[in-house]
Image (cartoon, rainbow, N blue to C red):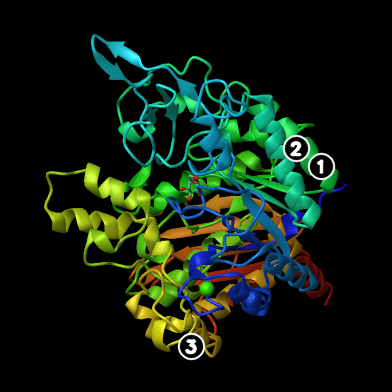
Amino acid sequence: MELFDFRRMSFYQIWIRSFADGNGDGIGDLYGVYDKLDYIASLGVDGIWFSPIYPSPNADYGYDISNYRDIHPDYGTLEDFRRVLDRAHALGLRVIMDLVINHTSDEHPWFLESRKSRDNPYSDYYIWRDPKWKGESRLPPNNWYSQFEGLAWEYCPERAQYYLHVFAKKQPDLNMDNPRVREEVKGIMRFWLDMGVDGFREDVITYISKHPQLPDGIPFLPVINGQPYYKDGPNLLTYLREFRAVAKEYGALQIGEAPMTPVGTALTYLTGEDRVLDMMIQFDHMTADCFLTEYLHHPFSLRKLKRAFSRWQNALAGKAWNALYLENHDHPRVISRYGSEEFRRESGTALAAAYLFQRGTPFIYQGQELGMTNIRLGSIEEYQDVATINTYHSFRRRQSEEKRLRHVHIASRDSARTPMQWDASENAGFSPVRPWFAVNPNYREINAEAEEADPQSILSFYRRCLRLRKESDTLLWGEYREYFPLHRHLYVYERSRGSERILIVCSFSKTEQTWQLPGGYAWEGCSPVLCNYPGEPTLGRLRPYEAQVLRWDGAAGEGAKRDHERE
Ligand code: GLC
Ligand code: CA
């Protein structure tokens, strides 16, 4: 079946536990989602990506799955999901699911069997290895570190072997080299596609093929020690081709998550006759204020951000299609990182204009459209995320508690996981009872209801941007070009098609900036189409975090000139 045209679309990401509580137990669920589908459609998006909603012990909030073919009882039932799916489709929204197949939960029945012995039907479903011995001491098979929790190996006395976990201990990696495991994956895909879902976001999909020898890594930075041997592995393309064949039968969309994948490598998955992914969630532009991970923070660099943006725009041009995003459940809130909480409305809207008009399919994460910001909890005990808690306890242990907590405030994924701020009532209108996780105290000012009523709000601006993008062939398909790449305060990019040129000019400065048009442009014939301040923008001048979208129609301009000459 033919794939739908995802390039015209934009998506809204739901991390269900914190989205909307429909049955009053403090936890977001499918009843809440059902009630908010009209809100989602009203944004002007065309699809929803659900972060995992399957049964899970929640060691990594849904990314540790214990049953691939059901719904977590906290969120509802398969019947409830079908209702949401049907209603979403009726509203013109596609629905894609998270496919997490690099690992399962250690409570998944496959693992419970696998760990029992070396010769049962599931014993090869995971990556088991004998210990290494150094005299009397038992050591793990290699020196890899997990990304979340110490060493990447956990010993299991029943088998007298270790299993590999690239993420938390409770997330054993599946052995994708086992053909039966790949058949299981295809079965899972069919299960959801038969139900009518439209595709998948494929979790850390570039990790599923491991180097057969599992050699020692270079212990330079623990969290990525081993990564060269489990990322972009030797059989990755072969396995992805198998999954692609299933997706093709259904015309299903496949978006792969690929941490730290350089653009050159990305092209091997995104291009060619048998391209195996339609889009890639890459991480390049998510490190404009850090090295590799948010925990290695440095001051925000607009130039670094622009380099990453343009690198992907240019490399994929005419060859592949970008997935555009600034937030998801794995990163702190973008205003607190790349913008300014002081100029929250201005920087939240400037950031929107900085990415929504690039070439690609935008993704918007719940609460981003409201300009939600980072939470700063008073102690590590109040945090929930396994990565946050482990990093706190294992990293910079000699620093004061206060300093370490400050790193958490800057870097924690939990800032993206606070309950959605629907209105100014108790618990932000998320739930009638105390929610499962702390509500950001700023909900009285920052909430959907207040922003609905305000034409200048971030929410209103997102709606305007998405409408403009959809109505403009130039913004959808036009060429991308960046100007003034070395400028420290301005991001200026052009989209052009035929005789139409659109300049998107975004200031990342807290003070007023003046700027001049790039060569080949003149103010004459310029029509402002969008601005994040009320009223008409002043050309050549930008207030703090001002964003202007300016349009030139060459054909109209030249036509007018000719008319003028004739007279
Ligand atoms: C992906 C998910 C993240 C999860 C990790 C392990 O990066 O987005 O939330 O913790 O994979 O599944
Ligand atoms: Ca609930």
Mark 3 CB lies closer than 8 A to ligand 2: no
- Label 1 residue SS: helix
Mark 2 CB lies closer than 8 A to ligand 1: no
Question: Mark 2: which amino acid?
Answer: Arg
Which residue occupies 79% across, 39% down? 246
Q: Are marks 2 and 1 in contact (CB under 8 Å)?
A: yes
Say above or below: 6 vs 116: below
Say above or below: 546 vs 172: below
Within 10 Å of disc 1 (Cα), the crowding (few <14, some 14-19, many 20+) is some
Question: Mark 3: which amino acid?
Answer: Ala
Question: Mark 1: which amino acid?
Answer: Lys
Within 10 Å of disc 3 (Cα), the crowding (few <14, some 14-19, many 20+) is some
Say above or below: 142 vs 224: above
Within 10 Å of disc 2 (Cα), the crowding (few <14, some 14-19, many 20+) is many
Seen from the viewer's position, the closer of residues 55 and 281 is 55
**439 left or right of 463 in image:** left
Which residue occupies 74% across, 59% down? 8
Q: Are marks 1 and 3 in contact (CB under 8 Å)?
A: no
Q: Which mark is residue 450?
A: 3
**Real-space CA distance between mark 1 and mark 3, rounded to the nearest whole angstrom:** 43 Å
Figure quadrant of residue 364: bottom right
Q: Which mark is residue 58?
A: none
Q: Which callout, 2 or 3, points to the residue nearer the camera?
A: 2
Q: Which residue is mark 1?
A: 248
